[in-house]
Image (cartoon, helix red, strand yellow):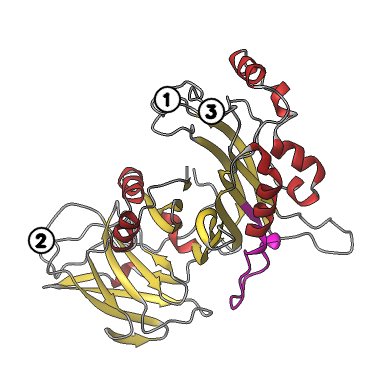
Amino acid sequence: MDMYVIGLQEMNCGIMSLLSDTAFEDPWSSFFMDVLSSLSFVKVSSVRMQGLLVLVFAKHQHLPFVQILTTKSTPTGLFGYWGNKGGVSICLKLYGYYVSVINCHLPPHIANNDQRLEHFDRILEMQNFEGHDIPNILDHDLILWFGDMNFRIEDFGLHFVRESIKNRCYSDLWEKDQLSIAKRHDALLREFHEGPLLFPPTYKFDKNSNDYDTSEKKRKPAWTDRILWRLKRQPQASPHVPSQQAYFSLSLRSYVSYMVYSISDHKPVTGTFDLELKPLVSAPLITLLPEGLWTMEDDMLISYSLSADFLSSPWDWIGLYKVGLRHINDYLSYVWVGDNQVSSNSGLYQVYINISDIPETEDQFLLCYYSNSQHSVVGMSKPFKVSWWGREEYCGGLEAFVSSPWPPD
């Protein structure tokens, strides 16, 4: 596994919770960072709108090739002004390819299908990127769209639906699933793919149980929680036009729900994908050089070089991290490259970073170069150890990261 994309809906969105999460990391983000950092995943980006949250994690070696272009919130509740319904999105560049991730919560109730479809279209239309050099979302290489879409099962009565679920006769229910019906009539929606619904409907359950709704309302079960994706159409090959150099392919490995979780009246759904691509960007914008890392007293000397098309900023910085970092803000020490540059010669730059507050340890470390203009890590070292004994000695083991084919072995 190289990336995780996580979407939640109906998080605690009371005013005190929102104020707390503005000042501190929200509990769900902290939980996922704690779990995934031990597996070498780093939180790349997140965006929240009231009860909606989307998180993107990547293995740390991919960070120089994951550029966060923009995040966006699109409220559709209360005439488009309230964020209890709507979508949150992250637009990123992955090894040079455009990828958009959208987490949504659409209107509920079986009679509001037209409103759901209208909100789906509205969220898509609002994914404009004025002021950014980003193509229209329909020209992105991948749109990954998921969430509580709230589509229901039409016509069939409660007893028939429950008996079909009990007997695992899901095929009878697929024909009356509102999303499946809509895809048969809407050309754009038809371009979004979905795996087979081979798991029980994920809504509505009594909390802390696997029993479908036993309240007075006795809501009819439905597949409300869905994962869709859309790949950009590849141009047709022509004998007069050279073949495309880009290659980007996504295939579904599994699409399942988890009955074991019962803290919600929904059951969570996951999709696992295999992504194959030919990198359009194969070298990081910043190379941290192995022969440039030295420690002397309380300072470490770092050498690095810039690619020809990278525009540095005085607000760029290099951070020193322990391997296992949760987020780019988890640095142990950092240095502004604009203010602390000590030499520059033939494209090679050097800066000192203070390590006086770092305890002597056998842990491994990483260096990351963060670009303020790109809001992303654009260069990263391989893991290395600091030679605490005799700091004047060279600390070997630091090499520039070079990308490997996706996914790596």
Nearer the observer, disc 1 or disc 3?
3
Classify residue 130 by image quadrant: bottom right
Magenta span includes 369: no
Classify residue 244 by image quadrant: bottom right
The three-letter code of the residue at mark 2 reads Trp
Residue plotted at (66% across, 59% down)? 122
Nearer the observer, disc 2 or disc 3?
3
Tell whether label 3 touches label 1 (CB within 8 Å).
Answer: no
Residue plotted at (69% across, 53% down)? 118
Nearer the observer, disc 1 or disc 2?
1
Residue 169 in the image: above or below residue 235 = above
Can I make out residue 246 in this image? yes
Q: Secondary structure at mark 1?
A: loop
Sooner in the amino-acid sequence: mark 1 or mark 3: 3
What residue is pinned by disc 3? 217
Q: Secondary structure at mark 3?
A: loop
Disc number for residue 389? 2
Q: Is residue 2 left or right of residue 132?
A: left
Q: Is residue 6 left or right of residue 351?
A: right
Of the pair 169 and 83, the residue shown nearer to us: 83
